[in-house]
Image (spheres, rainbow, N blue to C red):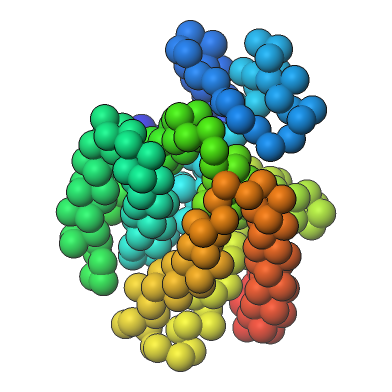
Amino acid sequence: GYLDDIKLNISPNIRLSLMIIFLIISVSFFPFKIFNIDLLFLNSWIENKFFSTIFIMLCILFIINGANLIDGFNGLLTINLIIINSVLLFINLKNNQLEFSFFLTAQIIILLSFLIFNFPKAKMFLGDSGSYLFGSLVSLNTIITNNVNSQISSFFFCILLSYLFFEVFFSFVRKLYQKKSPVLPDKSHLHMLSFAQTSKIFGADKSNYMNSVIINLVYSILVLPAIYFADNGLICKFWFFSIIFIYLLFYYRLYHLTKKNFDI
């Protein structure tokens, strides 16, 4: 990410390959493990070292790239990260995980401090290095919170990370369906389609940061109620797939509203 920020051009394929290599090395040499998965077959498979390494690598890879993908509008990624880490902090404080809560609090303070200079008018940017860094941290924060709070459904954390995860997953599948390269950027991501519509409502000056506000507001409305049943795996599974369905409805509507005016 840093090399890209200093304008050293790295092709998407090489960048993805380097991420995979670094993540596999990290997961192999450090004691990364995910416990308490609400899918019985995964709980048995995760005991296999090879499968566990690949599974954790993919989980982190999706979130890192999701963070980088949505980091294009003032405050969009930063506000989303603050919401996620605040929920994780609430869970850990509630269950007396005080040492880890201190670590989460430090990250939230850093993100809030950065937000002052990034929202509503941007004087600073996270860039690729910042989005990769905080994407990595929020991945680790979620894994640790899942592992030390066994009463919380693992699908609750899927709900919490649904926007970062599904934005990448859906983009990958969509581009394959459209016969595009899945690693090359395009203009058809949800936040870009949403921006096209907010521009009509708020104008050029306000649409950048208002797009971030609207997306994170909808995200909060969909995700935060799940806190009240975070220990119920069945409801969390239903809620997670309901969010995915709502995402697809929003995307379909925005895509067809925007298609007439933009080359997407």
Q: Find residue 189 and report its image quarter.
A: bottom right
Instruction: Please name whichever residue, 86 or 1, is drawn nearer the observer in this view of the structure.
Output: 86
Whole-percent x and y of residue 179? 80, 52
Residue drawn at (20%, 49%) of the image: 109
User: How many numbered marks appear?
Assistant: 0
Residue 99 in the image: state x and y as whole percent: 26, 30
The quarter holding residue 254 reads bottom right
| Residue 159 x, y percent position in the rendering | 58, 53
What residue is at 71 percent from the left and 50 percent from the top? 234
Residue at 55% across, 20% down: 33
Q: Residue at x 50, y 29 (%)?
A: 147
Is residue 57 placed above or below 163 in the rendered structure? above
Q: Is residue 263 above or below residue 129?
A: below
Q: Is residue 127 visible?
A: no
Q: Which quarter shows the C terminus?
A: bottom right
Residue 253 visible in rendering: yes
Report x, y in % for residue 190: 59, 66
Query: Eyeballing the image, is 70 above or below 151?
Result: below
**Vertical position of residue 168 compared to residue 263: above or below:** above
State which quarter of the image contains the N terminus: top left
- Given residues 84 and 76, the one toward you in this image is 84
